[in-house]
Amino acid sequence: MNIVVCIKQVPGTTKVAINPATNTLIREGVEAIVNPFDVYAVEEGIRLREKFGGKVTVIIMGPPQADQAVKTCIGMGVDDGIILSDRAFAGSDTLATSYTLAQGIKKMGGADVILTGKQAMDGDTAQVGPGIANWLDIPFVAWVKKIEDVNLAGKTIRVERMMDDGYEVIQSSLPMLLSVVKEINEPRIESMRGKMKAKSYKPVIWNAKDIECDPDFIGLRGSPTLVNRVFVPVRSGKKEIIEGATVEAKAESVVNKLRAAKLIN
Amino acid sequence: MMNYFFTEEQQMIIDTAKEFAAKHIKPVREKYDEEGHFPTEEVKKMGEAGLCGLYIPEEYGGMGKGIMGLCLAVEEMSKVCSAIALSMAATALGTFPILLFASDAQKKKYLPKIASGEDLAAFGLTEANAGSDALGMQTTAVKDGDYYVLNGTKQWITNGGEARVYSVIAVTDRARGSRGLTAFIIEKDTPGFTFGKKENKMGIRASATRELVFQNCRVHKDQVIAKEGMGAIVAVNTLYNSRPGVAAQALGIAAGAFEEALAYSRQRKQFGQPISSFQAIQHMLADMATEVEAARALLYATAKTIDAAGDAKAFAKESAMSKLYCSDIAMKVTVNAVQILGGYGYMKEYPVEKMMRDAKITQIYEGTNQIQRNEIALGLIKEIASKK
């Protein structure tokens, strides 16, 4: 079974600062980690390999420093890592990113299953996963909480997709792309053996030419999204103290206010 | 902690053990202690993380990181729960007879599964009437063709019932005294080999302690370690190698209790200020920190000495010193940690009372600290006598 996991490197903190001039994250001095949601995808990829055999490869778009993210995945037990790195990729939005990753996966010769986390912890868009599936013209299921069964001979897969009020069971043909939620597994820690392998591991690095990108679809040029403004919303700590002679009177006052705000009927 | 100039790989062991303990040991330690629940699942994950085979050579599926590697992992995990760490440390004790004296075929058969965490091991030496006087054991192994027939009971065996591989010492020729003992590798489920009830203990409650009961248990001669009559040498050398593991466990308990006490002393306010501002507490913390660091320095020096030495005679005394000092410190530091936490320290909601209960066994097992002092004194006298 050929498994590909798409990962992203994100700041390892929730206390990020934004450069107001460029509307971008200040990444200097902030430790970069593998997007926590992607770690569940990596774990699921390794579990699929343990069950069905084959190979797990992670793919990431980013600067050469992305090799730290790849090494973390190697430490967990992934077989190989590919970094898509080119100055021409800079400024990619979700459309250009998904195109670039899809080109990388094509260059790898495709995959039986492609896994992603449900979204990135920094951007929170959840668009790159479905974007890749679209570029590759394969089915996509979001929020997978369990892979029930894989039929490699029949090229089908059955998964459970988490919903607010339960779950759906979906059967699909392979290859396909799944985005996973944290309920799917409990990721392992990097093992001693994995860390030893990671120490000397050199990931494959491909540039735009290597993966035959159309220059119109990558980087800033391939990104129709314009970030107008990024800002930290001001918390409005408005509060109101409800007065009343009795508890009943106070409660009635609360109910009336909620009705007026159309929060309850 | 002082700079011990760890190699990159030693630092990896520490980091891995620390992460493992935080993720897999801390959430269950209180429950497992309360219920006396053996950490079967956790040991499996410990194996997957590569923490079970650190001291086993690479050719047998281990990591080849020596006694130092073993000690670093045991210390780090024991900071969080020494009872759960013990499942691996006591496996090391049961594995040393194989590692040190078994044939290549025996090593190939048993070590890879121990290194991967699939199999646990245990060491069967102690009996009801043979504790410190271990060589006065009663369990016999009588030769019958290609087999030995074992009869007798081993007592207080850590990992008893949970392990699959047992290194057991029995009397093959009583007339020959210490040269009449033989070591065997005995697998769980061998007919005639059963277990007594699980002991209800003061501390290390997540660890399993049981009797090993042999009733006409037939063990093939291929299961003899080294050769007949070598049992005492196997046992003694095993202990020389394994005692730093107990020291590491004790050091971890002490370091863990110290960390709890230090953190608490900064949070707890009395008379309008943190209790860490009182000299009475400060001096206790200063002593605890100094003792822990001294214990650590002695242990690491011992572990490095063992890893560099070829002959166990060269480190029998040092091995005993590390076990003696680290375990005495563990008892002292945990008692003081409970004292600093006061009434809270005595409650099960805080981890230090458990650490104090767990610390006590480290002064007792793998040779009481009185026996360690004998060992050290014997070493001193031998050294000076050989110099004249």
Image (tube, rainbow, N blue to C red):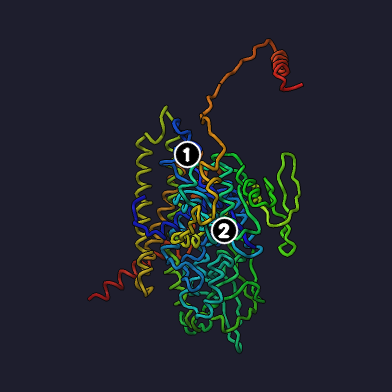
Residue extending farthest top: A245
Q: Dot 2, how many residues are within 10 Å of its Cα: few (below 14), some (14-19), or many (20+)?
A: few
Residue at the image position 51 percent from the left and 29 percent from the top: A231
Looking at the picture, which amino acid does disc 2 mark?
Answer: Lys
Q: Nearer the viewer, residue A107 or B378?
A: A107
- Secondary structure under tag 2 reads helix
- Asked whether disc 1 touches disc 2, contact meaning CB atoms under 8 Å apart, the reply is no
User: Viewed as shown, does residue B68 lie left or right of A59?
Assistant: left
Q: Nearer the viewer, residue B163 or A249?
A: A249
Chain name for mark 2: A
Chain name for mark 1: B
User: Which residue is the site of mark 2?
Assistant: A107
Task: Measuring from the top left, give residue A137's x and y in whole percent.
Answer: 67, 51
Residue at the image position 74 percent from the left and 53 percent from the top: A172
Q: Dot 1, how many residues are within 10 Å of its Cα: few (below 14), some (14-19), or many (20+)?
A: few
Task: Measuring from the top left, give residue B307's x and y in whole percent.
Answer: 38, 68
* Quarter occupied by the C terminus of chain B: bottom left
Residue extending farthest left: B388
Same chain for the residues under marks 1 and 2 in the image: no
Looking at the picture, which amino acid does disc 1 mark?
Answer: Gly
Task: Using the rendered image of the protein, determine whether residue B379 is visible from the camera's viewpoint.
Answer: yes
Q: Nearer the viewer, residue A82 or B223?
A: A82
Which numbered circle lies on residue B342? 1
Residue at the image position 56 percent from the left and 83 percent from the top: B222
User: Viewed as shown, does residue B221 lie left or right of A87?
Assistant: right
Task: Measuring from the top left, give residue A165's x and y in whole percent.
Answer: 74, 39
Q: Nearer the viewer, residue B199 or B268?
A: B268
- Secondary structure under tag 1 reads helix
Which numbered circle lies on residue B221? none
Q: CA distance from mark 1 to mark 2?
A: 65 Å
Task: Measuring from the top left, give residue B228's x and y in whole percent.
Answer: 50, 84
